[in-house]
Image (spheres, grey):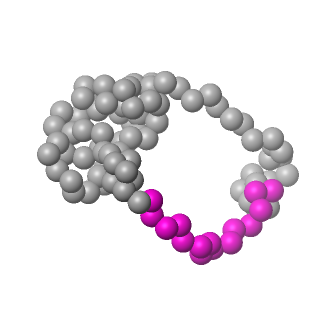
Amino acid sequence: MNLETAQKLVAQTLPGYQVHHPAEMDGAAPRQKSGVEVISPSLQKLKMRYFGANASSTPQVLDEADDSGIVLVEKEGSSGASKAMVFSGGLLKGKQG
C-alpha cells in the first residue's frame, strides 16, 4: 500500500488520526540493528511440525493489494505511541495498540 492510499483510508476510517511518520523518515540517523537473539529451526522443519508431511514445499505468495496492508497511525497533533491498523480491501479489519 502506498502512502497516499494509506492517508486516504486513515482519513475515511479513523477521524482524528494521521499516518505515523517515524523520526527515521525525517532524516534522523537510523537506529543500530541489534544482533540475533534467537535462532529458529529451518522453514522445512517448521512446516513439518505444524503442517505434517503434506506441507507444500513452495511458499504461496499473494500479490500485494493496493488497498491492503498494515498502517501505523497516531492521534493528530500527538507524537505519542502509535497504533497499528490492518486494512484489507479498503476496510479496517483489525487494530493493535
| Vertical comparison of 83 with 49: above or below | above
In the shown orientation, is residue 90 left or right of residue 51?
left
- Residue 49 drawn at (x, y percent): 75, 60
In the shown orientation, is residue 73 left or right of residue 87?
left
**Residue 88 shows in this picture:** no
**Residue 50 shows in this picture:** yes
- Residue 61 drawn at (x, y percent): 68, 35
- Residue 25 drawn at (x, y percent): 38, 47
Residue drawn at 25 percent across, 25 percent down: 12
Residue drawn at 77 percent across, 62 percent down: 42
Q: Nearer the viewer, residue 7 or 29?
A: 29
Task: Tell me where residue 16 sits by quadrant.
Answer: top left
Q: Main secondary structure of the magenta part?
A: loop
Task: Tell me where residue 71 sits by quadrant.
Answer: top left
* Magenta stretch encompasses residue 35: yes
In the shown orientation, is residue 79 left or right of residue 8?
left
Residue drawn at 30 percent across, 39 percent down: 19
| Vertical comparison of 94 with 32: above or below | above
State how many labels appear: 0
| Vertical comparison of 83 with 46: above or below | above
Give the quadrant of the C terminus. Answer: bottom left
In the shown orientation, is residue 12 left or right of residue 65?
left
Segment colored magenta: 30-44
* Magenta stretch encompasses residue 6: no
Residue drawn at 54 percent across, 71 percent down: 34
- Residue 95 drawn at (x, y percent): 35, 45
